[in-house]
Amino acid sequence: MDYVLLAVFITWAILLIIKRLRAHAGVLETLLILAVFGVFAADEYAGYVIIDSGILSWIAYAGLAISVFFFRAEWFVPKRIETDRVARLKKDHARLEGSYESLRKRFIATIELMRDGMIFRTEDGEMFITDRLLSVIGETENATTQQAYEKHIHADDIHGVKDALNRLTKKHPQYALSYRYRTAKGDVWIKEHGKMILYEGKKMIIATAETLDVKRYPHSEVDLLNSMRIDHELLERLQSLNRVKEPYHLIFFELSNIPAINRLYGRDIGDLMMGEFLTKLRYHFVRDENSVYRITGIRFAMIIRDDRKYQILERALKHGGELLNFEMKFGGVEENIYPHFGIQKITMFDEPVDELVARTTKALDIAISDDTHENYFVIG
């Protein structure tokens, strides 16, 4: 046996094993050593000569020389490999940290620009409230607990708040609720829209919150009532539409049970419900700011120029459904709004607008009276 050649094979094999483990390279060299060793074994033990032993030795020496020439000393030292890996990890960490910091700053800037306040609830009962909402409820600390926050919620509303939050699931993660929050200056209405998310296996609730107190929060539904155009502007609008000579629907409606709601719960509740009703009505049937007018306290006018929108209203009036199923809920107060509609399609444009208004008013009066079993009356 050629022990020198065997030593060459062993040395060559050790170098290749280290190279494969440390550098994940040397595939071709590995195939070469296996082939040469196979020929050597066949010659040495089976007596089957494939290549002359002298040539075989030179091939083995050459293979070892190539592996040694391209071998790196640091592959013998695991510490250097670990150092390089740590350096790469630090670089990746710095990049991720920079991305996180950029995201954090953008998130904070977004919150500061929001008109609404924000509430963050954790599964452990902790809460974080942004400055926008703190200024409304008269608190000073951003960090609090759900228990401390809920102590200020009206007794009639707290059960509904807890129930809404406890019913959140992965399948139904979103909620909307309203409740009264007790401040040093009296109760204010808070309206929340939120969503439950899962973070590291724990539940977290993120919500936007706005107050419906018109003095503190001028963009609420209540303020919609105070900023609406009044009847004389309606007459000017009708005159301008008649000059265009395009057919439209003139609709008068009255929220007939609002006075009863005011007597039961107070005018603030009645105003909130009227504002919510008008917001939904405008969203479904008109998007034009010049299309809804206030005639009296509970009587309004609406102009629909898009015939497709009117057809939606007509189907809702005839068949019911969610569009006109105005069930209002504010905290522990639940009431239905009962609207009545008087409708007239305007196709003649030379009549005085006073006559158009009078006929539509008559249609509304018929809808309110006991002469019809429907809550609407249409003039053909």
Image (cartoon, grey):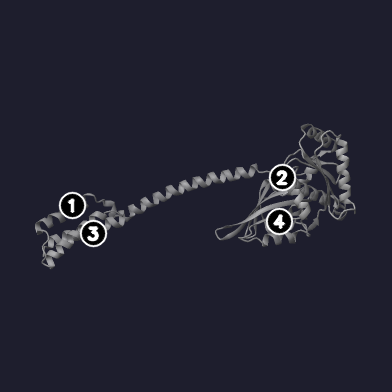
Give whichever of 129, 379 is nearer the camera: 379
N-term-proximal mark, 1 vs 4: 1
For marks 3 and 4, give the CA distance: 69 Å
Callout 2 secondary element: helix
Residue 30 location, quadrant? bottom left
Callout 4 secondary element: helix
Q: Residues within 10 Å of mark 2 (few under 14, many from 20)?
A: few
Q: Is residue 214 above or below residue 203?
A: above
The furthest residue to the right: 370
Q: Residue at x 12, y 54 (%)?
A: 58
Identity, as a three-letter code, of the amino acid under mark 2: Arg
Q: Residue at x 88, y 38 (%)?
A: 355
Q: Is residue 268 left or right of residue 85?
A: right
Q: Which residue has dot 1 on it? A: 65
Identity, as a three-letter code, of the amino acid under mark 3: Ile
Residue 183 appears anywhere in the view: no
N-term-proximal mark, 3 vs 2: 3
Q: Residue 289 — which label?
A: none
For marks 2 and 4, give the CA distance: 47 Å
